[in-house]
Image (cartoon, rainbow, N blue to C red):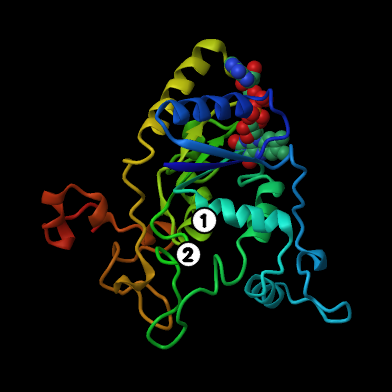
Amino acid sequence: MKVLLVFAHPEPRSLNGALRDVAIEELKAQGHEVRVTDLYAQRWTSEVDRADFLNLAPQAPLGPAAASKEAFAANALTDDVKAEIERLLWADALILQFPLWWFTMPAILKGWVDRVFAYGFAYGVGEHSDKRWGDRYGEGTLAGKRAMLIVTAGGWEPHYSGRGINGPIDDLLFPINHGILFYPGYDVLPPFVVYQADRIDDARFVSIAERLRERMRALASTRPLSYRPQNGGDYLIPSMQLRSELGASGATGFALHLNEAEALPVFERSLPSGLMRGG
Ligand code: FAD
């Protein structure tokens, strides 16, 4: 496979830097071709502004979405953004690697998404009508490719569990996994998360590195998260609400958008919904 790793840590000698090297080494050992976008090293510009849109008239007001649409269609995005779009099209798998900062990705990585996921490329794709709401959430330009996160967090694992004070890690990462990666079509793999990342001795590093190597070895075969595709019949158009008969009764929030039946072993999928986990 061709793998693009987008790296967002300012220090190559950090834990993140060491884990990036482990991941790349293992991917290459498996015969994969790897490219790295190192956002701090290449001094990535993270703000969207007029300079992004080479065909925007100097006097015209800047509407970022409209300007993005026009510049993408006219091939008038900046060279740095075009190069990243080319890399995304090249890669069969995308890895975003970052330390959790204020419960999400560092600003530089968000700025990479803001600028590279252009209108007509990552959103605003496909037919928008009373029958279809575009090609998104499982469909779109990047459909058929895989994506996963490598994340380090200072907090403890139980702090990120179902009842943990930080909120469940799957909820915190939902806007990235579902909103940024599944939206333009990626099959999203479960994240690789390192907890208590500020205190790591050599022995723990060895075991974390081995777990990461395992995940890299399984990059092509790991089962994606079972997010529900938008256009597979689970959602009403145009309200885009999950059909009332789906999901656990009374449930709201992020977990609704995982198809639990899909995640179950095949023999359990045939049970009446009330007998299913969470049914
Ligand atoms: P480093 O500081 O580089 O290293 C961490 C540990 O790994 C050290 O013990 C180091 O000795 C060891 N190590 C490094 N390299 C190696 C190696 N090659 N071999 C063996 N050991 C090694 N955490 C949260 O949980 N939630 C938050 O919301 C959050 N917000 C933050 C906001 C900011 C602005 C900052 C700065 C931190 C925040 N943190 C948060 C903590 C942050 O997630 C961690 O500091 C970060 O994940 C640690 O990763 P690092 O690569 O920076 O580690």
- Give how far apart the Cα atoms at labels 2 and 1 are: 8 Å
Which residue is denoted by mark 1 in the rendering?
Answer: 89
Residue 4 showing in the rendered view: yes
Q: Quadrant of ligand 1?
A: top right
Residue 234, horizontal then vertical, whole percent:
31, 71
**Mark whose residue sits in front, 2 or 1:** 1
Residue 71, horizontal then vertical, whole percent:
69, 72
Residue 141, labelled with which disc? 2
Q: Nearer the viewer, residue 206 or 30?
A: 30
Q: Kindly indicate whether the residue at mark 1 contacts the one at mark 2 (C-beta within 8 angstroms).
A: yes
What amino acid type is highlighted by mark number 1? Leu
Residue extending furthest top? Answer: 203
Quadrant of residue 153 within the rendered picture: top right
In which quadrant is the C terminus drawn? bottom left
> Looking at the picture, does residue 88 appear above or below residue 8?
below
Residue 274, horizontal then vertical, whole percent:
17, 61
**108 left or right, relative to 253:** right
Residue 127, labelled with which disc? none
Quadrant of residue 232 within the rendered picture: bottom left
Residue at 55% x, 69% y is 123
Nearer the N terminus, badge 2 or badge 1? 1
Residue 69, horizontal then vertical, whole percent:
64, 75
Residue 198 showing in the rendered view: no
Secondary structure beneath disc 2?
Answer: loop
Residue at 73% x, 39% y is 40
In which quadrant is the N terminus drawn? top left
